Image (cartoon, helix red, strand yellow):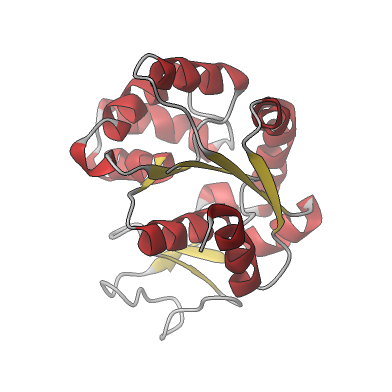
Amino acid sequence: MKIIMLGAPGAGKGTQAKRIAEKYQIPHISTGDIFRSNIKEGTELGMKAKQFMDQGLLVPDEVTIGMLLDRIHQDDCEKGYVLDGFPRTIPQAESLTKALSDRGEAIDYAIDVDVLDENIVNRMSGRRACLTCGATYHVTFAPPAKEGICDVCGAELVLRDDDKPETVQKRLAVYHEQTQPLIDYYKEKGVLHSVDGTKDMEEVFQSITEILGA
């Protein structure tokens, strides 16, 4: 079961991707996690990615694609995977389609979590992240037990630069220009399914499991 999560930044696709991975026992592969790991370790790739992420811009394809393709062909992906944050552009989607096709494989489901821009700006400005362990929270929807402190490792939580309202607006503009065309791309492939991301998280997950087959 090879699944791609689509939707604007902050639509909640990452949360749903994790739940899908748990339910169906397949890896949740987030390019964001890979980037943050590299940033934390101070690698050359991480520093490159950070320059773009802090400006709300997409990380260039050459930084992303090879790393992603290596990941999805590891042993733990034998039964499938759920991709979160990739592909983000038509060229990336085409590269992925070709790489899979060369192995006689294809994406089975592209799930679009649909949320209005206004809702997304409000959601993301409430997000808080732990830069030490990568855990994420929301001041309204998923607060930590102690305000401003990570439940997992006890480090201080921060509002990341790419979650600030002005950066979110730029990210949404980039999304509509470069990433939204993926909806048509996967619709033409016959694998696109949309869910209403403004609903309660449980309802959204239920809609997704109905698509995937409970």
Q: Is residue 130 visible?
A: no
Above-or-below relation of 79 to 50: below
Image coordinates for residue 134, horizontal then vertical, percent:
34, 58
Q: Is 146 displayed left or right of 154 in the figure? A: right
Count of marks overlaid on the render: 0
Q: Which residue sits furthest left?
A: 75
Residue at horizontal 46 percent and vertical 31 percent from the top: 51
The quarter of the picture where residue 58 lies is: top right
The residue lying toward the viewer, choosing from 172 and 200, is: 200
Residue at horizontal 64 percent and vertical 63 percent from the top: 207
Image coordinates for residue 88, horizontal then vertical, percent:
57, 30
Q: Is residue 117 visible?
A: yes
Above-or-below relation of 31 to 151: above
Q: Which residue sits furthest bottom?
A: 145
The residue lying toward the viewer, choosing from 176 and 71, is: 71
Image coordinates for residue 188, horizontal then vertical, percent:
70, 25
The residue lying toward the viewer, choosing from 134 and 80, is: 80
The residue lying toward the viewer, choosing from 127 and 23, is: 23
The quarter of the picture where residue 152 lies is: bottom left
The quarter of the picture where residue 40 lies is: top left
Above-or-below relation of 107 to 20: above
Image coordinates for residue 46, horizontal then vertical, percent:
33, 33
